[in-house]
Amino acid sequence: MTEIPQTTIEVLIPRYPVLLLDAYGVLVNDSSALPGAAGLIDELNRTGKPYYLLTNDASKLPQTAANRFQGYGLAIEPDRIITSGGLLKGYFKSHGLRKARCAVLGPDDSAQYVIEAGGTVVSPANGFDMVVIGDEAGFPFVETVDTVITELFHKVERRERFHLVLPNPDMIYPKADRGYGIASGSIALIIEAALRLRYPGRPHLCFERLGKPHAAIFQEALKRSGTREMVMIGDQLETDIRGANTFGLDSVLVDTGITDPTTAGMPDQPRPTYRMHSIKLRQKESIN
């Protein structure tokens, strides 16, 4: 297999009319901006270059995320942030789920996404029509997962219908000091494994995944930008790169996040259009 071409952010900015940037592993970790992120965002804002953040994070509303990024020195406005949580509105509408009783695993903003989509947030202990995993934090982990699994078992045995929805399919995310943490996709795997163990041969007992690599979040970027001439810059082969490739976009794998760079060219992995060491601008002068 041929080597993946290397590129730089200075080459990408004039080449593509619109840049799509992942957040965690590209611009930030869990507690700060990554090197070069502030300079890049300042340059894009100064020149009026169209860009959007495509993030699988469903734990923060766009305004909350913007406030967080701005606290890290990244001048990103809420209307530039496209989150997987925002996809719930379309999902609820297409499945006729208005007023569905939803057990939401995640913080307050995850619950707010469900409310804005038309759902009613309920305690998992009080019964539900739907489980939405918005994040791995913001709730008592073991107790909540145990309660959800127990109720799902009872619902299967009572032959009741229910929906399982996972806005963020990410299984891990990068933390500061080369640390890593589990993400909401890992919580879904736990629940799915329990369902498979008790009810083998029922593949439908699984979560519907909304964010990258699935098309809906890229479709929202297309709607906002008005062009397919976009490039996805991300740190994960399975979400950022696979999703962009499937949607027909060029993709760039950055070495600063989850993916081990040595796996990027392996035959069984999604292949990015380019590789890039980081998003840090190499020159101080402006890009024209």
Image: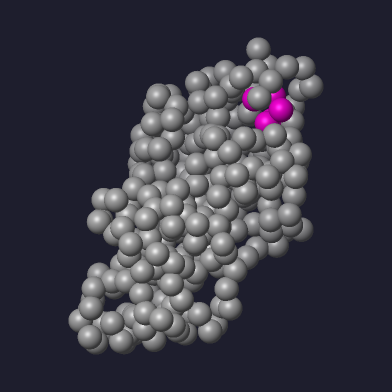
Q: Nearer the viewer, residue 19 or 139?
A: 139
Q: Would residue 242 be visible to someone looking at this image?
A: no
Whether residue 41 appears in magenta in the rendering, the answer is yes
Highlighted range, magenta: 40-44
In the image, farthest residue toward the right? 284
| As drawn, 181 above or below 221 | below
The residue that appears at 28% across and 82% down in the rendered structure is: 155
Q: Residue 2 in magenta?
A: no
Q: Quadrant of residue 59?
A: bottom right
**Going by the image, does 164 lie left or right of 284?**
left
The spot of residue 101 in percent (x, y) is 36, 69
Q: Position of residue 209 (x, y in %)?
A: 38, 58
**Residue 260, how many percent across, how many down?**
59, 53
The answer to whether 158 is drawn above or below residue 108 in the figure is below
Residue most toward the left?
Answer: 159
Number of marks in the rendered image: 0
Q: Say which quadrant the C terminus sits in.
A: top right
Q: Quadrant location of residue 158? A: bottom left
Say if 281 sits above or below 151 in the image. Answer: above
Please state which of residues 121 and 188 is positioned toward the viewer in this rendering: 121
Predominant secondary structure, magenta span:
helix
Colouring scheme applied when the structure was drawn: one colour
- Residue lying at 73% horizontally and 35% vertically, measured from the top left: 38
For the point 50% across and 69% down, which residue is it? 105
- Please tell me whether residue 22 is drawn above or below residue 17 in the rendered image: below
Residue drawn at x 56%, y 62% is 108
Q: Is residue 75 left or right of residue 21?
A: right
> Is residue 282 among the parts visible in the rendering?
yes
Q: Position of residue 119 (x, y in %)?
A: 38, 60
Q: Quadrant of the N terminus?
A: top left
